[in-house]
Amino acid sequence: MLKGLSITPPVIGRISIGRIVEKNGKRLPEKDDQFTVTTQIQQRGEWILHPLNESLRKAATGKLRAIPVRFLFNDPDLNLRAEYSLFDRDTGRPMCVGNGATCKRVCESGIEELPCPSPDGCAFGQARNCKPYGRLNVTIGDEDELGSFIFRTTSYNSIRTLAARLHYFSAVSGNLLACLPLELKLRGKSTTQSYRGAIYYVDLSVRTDSTLEQAIAQARELDGKRRTAGFDQAALDAAARAGFANGAFEDSAEDGSAVVDELHPDVGRDGDVGSGSGSAANVSGGTDATGGATVAPANGSPTLRQKLERKAVLLGGASA
């Protein structure tokens, strides 16, 4: 195994709740209130839809706001990795990644381990738009049992909710998270910070046609079949854990460019984050100052309230 290279779960597609559009020569996030499943290939600046996107929409009644999923690993922290992250906007390379206690930062002398006071208490992070960044890997269908779809987010609401759900489901199932039939669900809520407007975040629940007790029974049955077939879940978790630990940063410069596009839109001359995106930005995870996705105005123009919110984010005044 190459040292210094983080070995991450194989990705065969993406899950987002928005897309990137080009306006006035800038690539900016445009929010949505439903899921979209894409491939890893772009055409004319847009991600090509995955065949599963159409089949999932046909099975849904109305908008695609729930996706049936399973997880690769029993360890919740392997399925969802979340840190405070800061990227170089020009190269897409990670510059600083921390967990609120310590961080790894690229310095002139190399990568150094430093204290991490979180973005609110870090002058370096505030000046460079450091924010929470989560990556969730899930499997959809049975086409590739070890291939995953990735959902990236900078939403406090999504990260916090998904982390809680993963740990809870792992606990109640007796550490059979990888065998549980679950679904990603898009939820909406209003807060004082969103001025009672709708924001959207991603949650995790048992599938609509099932109860928690039924899901646990199915997980035990699947776990028994896998053990009989010789499937070693503990070894798979251990291999993933070693792969993540093999590199200083999970994201490569190649992936970082897409991350910067989606999660760190251009900062305009007037201090706005993006332009007409409706919030402080995150296409995959849908986040604004409150940590959720908001839908852009019909005419695509930001309101005065949105401009003030964006300036507050840049000044380090916004938090979930």
Image: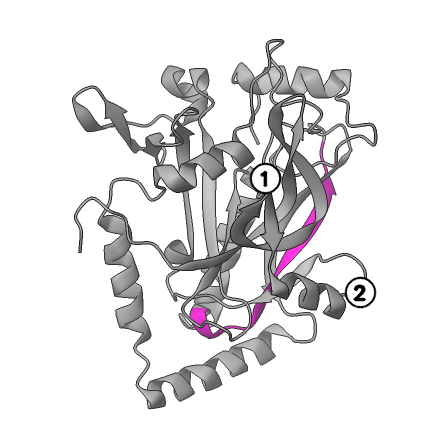
**What residue do we see at 45% from left, 22% from top?**
120
Query: Label 2 vs label 1: CA separation?
Result: 29 Å
Q: In this rendering, is residue 119 above or below 282?
A: above
By secondary structure, the bulk of the magenta-drawn segment is best described as strand
Q: Is residue 218 magenta?
A: no
Name the amino acid, label 1: Gly
Callout 2: helix, strand or loop?
loop
Q: Which residues are magenta?
A: 178-191
Residue under pointer 1? 45
**What residue do we see at 76% from left, 27% from top?**
195
Callout in the foreground (2, 1): 1
Q: Earlier in the sequence, mark 2 or mark 1?
A: 1
Residue 318: where, in percent of width, then height?
Answer: 57, 23
Colouring chosen for the image of the structure: one colour
Q: In this rendering, is residue 293 above or below 185?
A: above
Identity of the residue furthest to the bottom in this view: 228
Residue under pointer 2? 61
**What residue do we see at 71% from left, 21% from top?**
306
